[in-house]
Image (cartoon, helix red, strand yellow):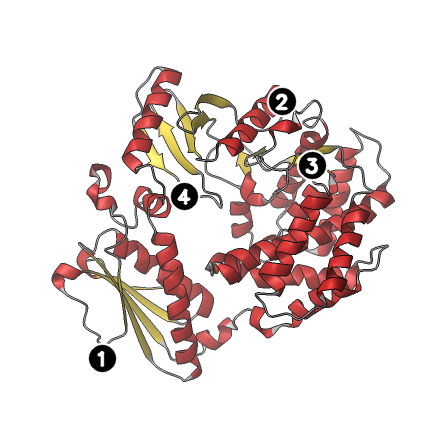
């Protein structure tokens, strides 16, 4: 939720867009939120289009805009910046389309198809150029936080893991011994060459694919550092689940590109690379701990088992030239901890439970429970910012893209739905264990059109994907046929 209203923000984007291209915008569409607090809109007129961005963090804007200008002038694959209004914290950038490298991962199934491997090879080739050529003459004083990935930065990441994963996960450890291992690891990593641009969060959601070519976004957290870190970030991204043999092949592909730019000792590079893989894996667990264990966000909780699979592989296959006994003890402990294990979906698939989910209008009353059990969960969505108050959304529903993006960007819907997950998950798991046959979950709002429809859809999808039970979904006021998820 942002202090600026959607209407004010859209008006500001319209003004900036028209001053840039000389045409009035025909479309100003909010886009789905990213992992940050930035807000994005797709803006179009007859002959022009752009992505509008709003970010209240002025320092982060400065980093992104100055880096973008520098990289674009050097021919790097980044969006062109069209116009800025930094007093209002908004700017326009090139529209790179809808497709991220992550979207290709979602479609790949269990195997890595050849076209996806080729995309990764293109990405790694461009990454090498961004790190080496893009890093030349870059003014690191514009960095959002630290100008380099120094020892303090590393210790911040390592302690993030300690406080938000180990402690919140109730993993016992010797704090003094662990702190010593943190310093040992950081000191080792800093003996690598750290004079290149380090993207910092180089993962598939930050890589757009347009006309078969990769483009990079969201590098405002970049700083000076070792090239190994970004390669580790991409190849060990938790949900990418890249097979070890393919990871090794892609690493060699990257080194082929890097050797065209700088002199590389491959054995030395790979030794440091293994160290940067470790700190990246630890940093990711810290982030998942904060977002998942602390903030209780389902997406991050569901990502923990994938991250632990990477840890298990690492512990079984990689040997660093330094001793980290307490850190390795902690990593072994988290991979074995039952609280981090993924729910066995086959239990839900084999159960006799049916979950009935409905949206409704309070004006027409709470839906009757047809199971004969006397009712179930009823959640009131009326406190959530209502897109139906705004003319562009009045004739739409919670299934339309612009309404979905409005609810995700300009309301507390994400927090609400996330809290619902934690309530209903406990019920679903208990009902599966006790062989119950029915659970009802209802979402109400004023008209049963926007907020309740969206919430019901999200919870139905979540329960089916996580548990595999039979899910029946009905939007009562819409008159749509009841759906069985599959």
Residue 98 visible? The answer is yes
Q: Is residue 314 left or right of residue 323?
A: left
Mark 3 and mark 4: span between their CA atoms? 31 Å
Residue sitting nearer the eye, 171 or 218: 171
Mark 3 and mark 2: span between their CA atoms? 23 Å
Q: Which image quadrant is residue 70 in?
A: top right
Q: Is residue 332 left or right of residue 51?
A: right
Q: Which circle marks residue 420 in the picture?
A: none
Q: Are marks 4 and 2 in contact (CB under 8 Å)?
A: no
Mark 4 and mark 2: span between their CA atoms? 28 Å
Q: Earlier in the sequence, mark 1 or mark 2?
A: 2
Q: Residue at x 44, y 22 (%)?
A: 84
Q: Which residue is mark 1?
A: 374
Q: Which residue is mark 3?
A: 148
Q: Which residue is mark 2?
A: 75
Q: Are marks 1 and 2 in contact (CB under 8 Å)?
A: no
Q: Secondary structure at mark 4?
A: loop
Q: Secondary structure at mark 3?
A: loop
Q: Earlier in the sequence, mark 4 or mark 1?
A: 4
Quadrant where the image shows the N terminus? top left
Q: Which circle marks residue 32 in the picture?
A: 4
């Amino acid at each position: 939720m942002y202090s600026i209203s959607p209407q004010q923000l859209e008006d500001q984007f319209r003004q900036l867009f028209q001053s840039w291209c000389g045409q009035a915008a025909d479309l100003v569409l909010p886009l789905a939120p990213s992992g940050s607090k930035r807000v994005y809109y797709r803006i179009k007129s007859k002959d022009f289009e752009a992505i509008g961005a709003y970010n209240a963090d002025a320092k982060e804007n400065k980093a992104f805009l100055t880096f973008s200008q520098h990289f674009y002038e050097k021919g790097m694959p980044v969006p062109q910046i069209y116009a800025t209004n930094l007093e209002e914290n908004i700017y326009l950038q090139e529209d790179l389309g809808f497709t991220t490298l992550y979207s290709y991962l979602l479609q790949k199934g269990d195997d890595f198809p050849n076209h996806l491997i080729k995309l990764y090879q293109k990405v790694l080739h461009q990454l090498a150029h961004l790190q080496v050529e893009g890093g030349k003459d870059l003014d690191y004083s514009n960095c959002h936080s630290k100008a380099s990935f120094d020892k303090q930065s590393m210790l911040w990441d390592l302690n993030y893991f300690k406080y938000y994963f180990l402690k919140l996960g109730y993993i016992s450890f010797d704090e003094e011994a662990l702190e010593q291992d943190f310093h040992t690891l950081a000191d080792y990593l800093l003996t690598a060459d750290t004079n290149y641009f380090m993207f910092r969060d180089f993962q598939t959601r930050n890589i757009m694919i347009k006309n078969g070519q990769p483009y990079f976004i969201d590098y405002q957290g970049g700083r000076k550092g070792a090239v190994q870190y970004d390669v580790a970030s991409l190849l060990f991204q938790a949900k990418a689940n890249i097979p070890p043999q393919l990871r090794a092949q892609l690493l060699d592909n990257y080194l082929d590109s890097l050797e065209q730019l700088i002199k590389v000792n491959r054995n030395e590079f790979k030794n440091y690379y293994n160290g940067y893989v470790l700190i990246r894996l630890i940093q990711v667990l810290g982030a998942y701990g904060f977002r998942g264990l602390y903030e209780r966000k389902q997406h991050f909780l569901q990502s923990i088992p994938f991250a632990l699979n990477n840890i298990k592989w690492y512990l079984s296959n990689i040997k660093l030239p330094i001793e980290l006994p307490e850190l390795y003890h902690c990593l072994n402990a988290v991979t074995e901890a039952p609280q981090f294990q993924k729910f066995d979906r086959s239990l839900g698939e084999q159960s006799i439970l049916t979950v009935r989910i409905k949206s409704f209008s309070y004006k027409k009353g709470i839906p009757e429970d047809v199971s004969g059990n006397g009712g179930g969960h009823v959640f009131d969505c009326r406190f959530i910012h209502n897109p139906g108050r705004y003319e562009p959304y009045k004739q739409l529903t919670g299934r339309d893209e612009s309404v979905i993006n409005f609810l995700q960007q300009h309301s507390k819907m994400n927090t609400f739905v996330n809290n619902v997950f934690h309530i209903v998950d406990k019920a679903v798991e208990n009902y599966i264990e006790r062989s119950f046959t029915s659970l009802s979950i209802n979402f109400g709002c004023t008209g049963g059109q926007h907020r309740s429809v969206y919430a019901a859809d999200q919870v139905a999808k979540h329960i089916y994907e996580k548990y595999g039970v039979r899910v029946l979904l009905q939007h009562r006021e819409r008159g749509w046929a009841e759906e069985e998820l599959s």
